[in-house]
Amino acid sequence: MDAFAGRTGLIDEQGDPARRYLWTDAFAVQAFFGLSHALREEKYRQQAIRLIDLVHEHLGKFHPRDSREGWISGLDNDSGSLQPTVAGLRIGKKLPERQEHESYNSRLEWERDGQYFHYLSRWMNTLLQAHKETKDQNYLLHARDLFLATDKFIYGIGNGLAMYWKMDTQLSSPLVPSMGAHDPLEGLLCGMSLKNAIFEEDKEVETLIEKFRIMCRGKSWTTTDALGIGGLLLNAARAAELESFGMHLPASVQAGKLFRESMNSLRGLHGFGKDQNPNRRLAFRECGLSLGLHVAKASENAIFDTSASEGLTDYFYLASEIEEFWLNSEHRQAATWNDHLDINSVSLASSLIASEAPEVFSAI
């Protein structure tokens, strides 16, 4: 985390503070808060706060290579600084978003900017954690603004609602029209977490929560993707924490269901981790799973029934195997590690930190 902070301008004047990527930075903020808990060092708490400011400053504005300038919300500089998330946040890709005259290329689209819903939901969780850590109401207001901005991802009427997976920078049109497998789940739990934090009726938030509730009805969340399973475990822990506060969740997202589907997903990971060639593995996807396992392990006694906990125990070893593989310095020489250095290193650090301070990754 110190090396990441140096590379990205948090602590080193030689670093590049514009080196921002929303998914990586979301986990980095939580990891810095986790380090401040585990090591009792204030500097990491301050780095988390500075990183939030840098994300808003850079990803709340247009891509450096975009012909447009300023805040993506269209607000003037002062107003935009006060509401940096009101129109969402950019992904942080190296290439600007695809223009209308450019044809769709599935490979190239991965390298282009825009907005991903699942990155915005991850940042909402981060802002809620920041509010919990600092008691600063601005973080709660930023989370609310961001949640309401995600309404632009939803289309359809009545019970026929669906979501776009990726939209353009100003949330005016879809760039990838398909829906992410867990996007409605993430949206509903973010909304419920926000509602729990606000402590008062908020009709706009309630209206959007209802849209996500409709999209979650009857859904199965089982997945064969390691990163997706890790996210499902995080959501199971988050749902259980909401339930512990007396919040009623719809059957489709209750902790028991999410945990059972996490278990079903884990059972489908046949031969996971057997390939010892790091060039055929992606650290950040695997460490997302180990992170989720750590958080679920920390929560098992308090929130899961006995039979479910026994099943989870069978998979705890995976977290250690994943971490040990990527802690091997020879494996970190692989192209798959260095081509994605920031997201890999932050993901590995987050997994390790979650074994000591799991609470920073499941804030509501």
Image: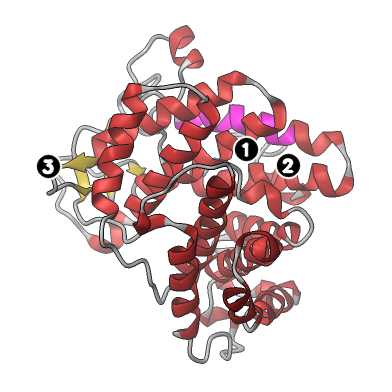
Q: Earlier in the sequence, mark 3 or mark 2?
A: 2
Question: Is residue 251 or residue 161 the one in the foreground?
Answer: 251
Q: Residues within 10 Å of mark 2 (few under 14, many from 20)?
A: many
The amino acid type, in three-letter code, at marker 2 is Phe
Question: Is residue 172 or residue 255 the one in the foreground?
Answer: 255
Measure the alpha-carbon separation of dots 1 and 3: 33 Å
Q: Which mark is residue 33?
A: 2
The amino acid type, in three-letter code, at marker 1 is Gln
Q: Which residue is mark 3?
A: 158
Q: Is residue 287 left or right of residue 6?
A: left
Residue 52 is covered by the magenta coloring: yes
Q: Is residue 169 visible?
A: no
Expressed as whole percent of the image width and height from the top left, the position of residue 275 reads 56, 89
Residue 145 figure quarter: top left
Question: Is residue 251 or residue 266 the one in the foreground?
Answer: 251
The amino acid type, in three-letter code, at marker 3 is Gly
Which mark's residue is nearer the viewer, 1 or 3?
3
Q: Earlier in the sequence, mark 2 or mark 1?
A: 2
Residue at (72% x, 37% y) in the render: 14
Q: Is residue 276 left or right of residue 176?
A: right
- Quarter of the image where the C terminus is located: top right
Expressed as whole percent of the image width and height from the top left, the position of residue 8 reads 65, 41
Q: Which residue is mark 1?
A: 129
Mark 1 and mark 2 in contact (Cβ < 8 Å)?
A: yes
Question: Is residue 38 or residue 207 the one in the foreground?
Answer: 207
Expressed as whole percent of the image width and height from the top left, the position of residue 216 reads 29, 54
Residue 166 is covered by the magenta coloring: no
Q: Residues within 10 Å of mark 1 (few under 14, many from 20)?
A: many
Q: Looking at the picture, does residue 261 appear above or below residue 302? A: below
Residues in magenta, as a range: 47-59
Which mark's residue is nearer the viewer, 2 or 1?
1
